[in-house]
Every structure is written in structure tokens, then in C-alpha cells.
Image (cartoon, rainbow, N blue to C red):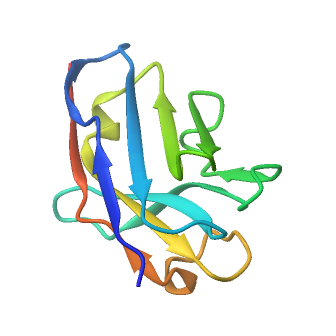
């Protein structure tokens, strides 16, 4: 069983930045970030392979968000720049024993989420 704990969410003005962190109790997993806005389905944001050499991003965040990991600290980060009101959502960290992927169904463990609110 892997425990995931997200932190770093908050309220920020449009154009601002936040960095989310996800501390994991185990390593050797591909990691991903997903988000869910009120009234919408959970959507993929970014993923990173367990060695950190490969990443994928949703088109809506490409060029603005950066996913990274520090395996020594067993922590994954999501640096979010140029935030927009439409980025407002609960952000979830997830771990996959499988290959890094955009598919939420391939993730085995999920955190509780952290709220990100971007004001206009």
C-alpha cells in the first residue's frame, strides 16, 4: 500500500504560480497529477516515469506546468506557472505500478487532493 499526501494548494491570482508537492511512502512508481473542477470529470494533467526521464502533459497545461520528481525524497512536484481561472480544481496525485500514462484507470493509488483556486 502506498500513501500519497499532496500539499501546496491555495488561492492565487491569474498569472501567478504555485508548486504542488506529493510525498509518497514508496518509490519505483510512475506518478501523475490529475484535477477535478466542480461539476466536471477528473482529467489528466501530467505524468512522469519513475526514473523521471519521460513526461507527458495535457494540452491545456503544456508550456505552463512542469512535473518533476526527487526519488531521494520520494516526492513529485507540479510547478504551475501562468495560472488561469480555468485551472481552478482539486488536484490529485496518483501512483501507477504500470507505465506512465494519461489514463486514470491505470493508477493504483491516489492522494486526497489539494485545492487550487485561481482568481481573475
Side (left or right) of 28 relative to 13: right
Side (left or right) of 2 relative to 45: left
Quadrant of image for the N terminus: bottom left
Q: Residue at x 69, y 82 (%)?
A: 98
Quadrant of image for the C terminus: top left
Where residue 28 sits, quadrant-wise, is bottom right
Examine the rendered structure and indicate whether residue 88 appears above or below residue 48. above
Side (left or right) of 40 relative to 92: left
Examine the rendered structure and indicate whether residue 116 appears above or below residue 42. above
Nearer to the camera, 74 or 90: 74
Nearer to the camera, 36 or 70: 70
Percent x, y of residue 45? 51, 53
Side (left or right) of 30 relative to 54: left
State the count of labels.
0
Q: Residue at x 23, y 65 (%)?
A: 112
Q: Residue at x 50, y 30 (%)?
A: 79
Amino acid at each position: 500500500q502506498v500513501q500519497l499526501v499532496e500539499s501546496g494548494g491555495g488561492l492565487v491570482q491569474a498569472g501567478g504560480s504555485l508548486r504542488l508537492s506529493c510525498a509518497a511512502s514508496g518509490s519505483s512508481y510512475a506518478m501523475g497529477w490529475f484535477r477535478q473542477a466542480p461539476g466536471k470529470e477528473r482529467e489528466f494533467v501530467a505524468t512522469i516515469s519513475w526514473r523521471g526521464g519521460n513526461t507527458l502533459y495535457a494540452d491545456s497545461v503544456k508550456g505552463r506546468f512542469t512535473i518533476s520528481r526527487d526519488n531521494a525524497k520520494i516526492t513529485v512536484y507540479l510547478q504551475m506557472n501562468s495560472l488561469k481561472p480555468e485551472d481552478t480544481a482539486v488536484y490529485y496525485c496518483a501512483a501507477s505500478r504500470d507505465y506512465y500514462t494519461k489514463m486514470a484507470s491505470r493508477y493504483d493509488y491516489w492522494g486526497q487532493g489539494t485545492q487550487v483556486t485561481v482568481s481573475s
